[in-house]
Image: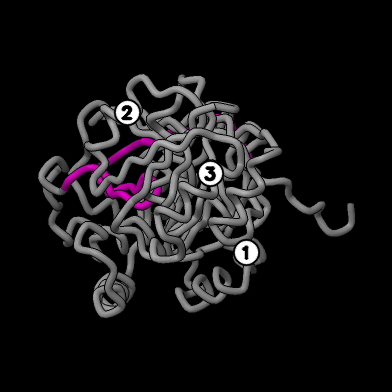
Amino acid sequence: MQATLIYNRNAGGIDQAAVEDLREAIQEAGYQPVYKATSSQEELDPILADIEGLVIAAGGDGTIRAIATRLVGKKAPLAILPMGTANNIATTLRLDGSPLEIIAGLKNPERTFFDVGRVTSPWGIDYFLEGFGFGFFADLLESYDPNKGKSILRSVKAILEILPGYQAYHSHLKVDEQVFAGNYVLVEVLNTTAIGPWLKFAPQADPGDGVFEVVCLHEDEQEGFLSYLTGLLSEGLPDLKSVEHRQGRKLEITWTGFAIHIDGEVRPERSERPADRDPAVGARPAYREVEDDQKIVAEVIPGALELWLPPRPPEVGT
């Protein structure tokens, strides 16, 4: 079988293995290696348009997402070589070992299926592997601007810019058939255990169970951002009284112009959003009401991807 290695030359941990070593390991695992180096997502379209055989994605979560979402609806299975910074997808899958060890394990792969999220919004359709949401994480991501590259200084600047005096967004949510409304500091729809820089919003998430984990963080005067951040870092977020956790296959949000994130990307562009409202008018949403109560809908596509993994050790206690 042919195995197409797609290698992001810009990934943070791409120096873990040389291309020639990866190609040799793929051949030793019993595949015919084809090598495709990329430096932008646009280069993936002609590569994956009529792809056949196994696809091996080498890079970080962004690279894996860009490749995986282009394989939805195709019969080509996907293998992952986590060579990025966070590697949230690989962590959720309990995918350990070096890139060469992972390839060696593909001699007798374990086949599994991975859900994909589809987001339908006023500006089009997007897909996510990790999660999507709105609130302080989306606003931090927008302020940080991942398109400018990784920077600790910029991340600190974004935190200092966004968090002091942060106001919640008021929104109506519908999770499957249940309807809710409130002032939300954050709403996250999770397919993996963590998003961003190892933020474990949903430690129990399973990307193969056909449902999302929905985490809603309500505004609470007694629980400040220090409590929220401590809860995230210690995996104790679900213990806070301001946190609601649900599961669902479909989430509908009334959109009033705020930023959302799709995995590590921000939507829509500022130029595509309603202009800011006068702060004297009141609390969030800090944007003018969108005509006709526009909606953002996230739906799970169960088993949208076939993944090939090296045999994994059994979980503790099984």
Residue pointed to by mark 1: 241
Q: Earlier in the sequence, mark 2 or mark 1?
A: 2
Verify whether residue 255 appears in magenta: yes
Q: Which residues are magenta?
A: 247-269
Numbered tag placed on residue 125 in the rendering: 2
Mark 2 touches mark 1? (CB < 8 Å): no
Q: CA distance from mark 2 to mark 3?
A: 35 Å
**Amino acid at pointer 1:** Lys
Verify whether residue 43 appears in magenta: no
Q: Is residue 90 left or right of residue 38?
A: right
Q: Is residue 134 left or right of residue 269?
A: right
Q: Within 10 Å of the Cα at label 1, are there few (<14), some (14-19), or many (20+) other Cα atoms?
A: few
Residue pointed to by mark 3: 26
**Amino acid at pointer 3:** Ile
Q: Within 10 Å of the Cα at label 3, are there few (<14), some (14-19), or many (20+) other Cα atoms?
A: many
Would you say residue 202 is visible in this rendering? no
Colour approach in the figure:
one colour
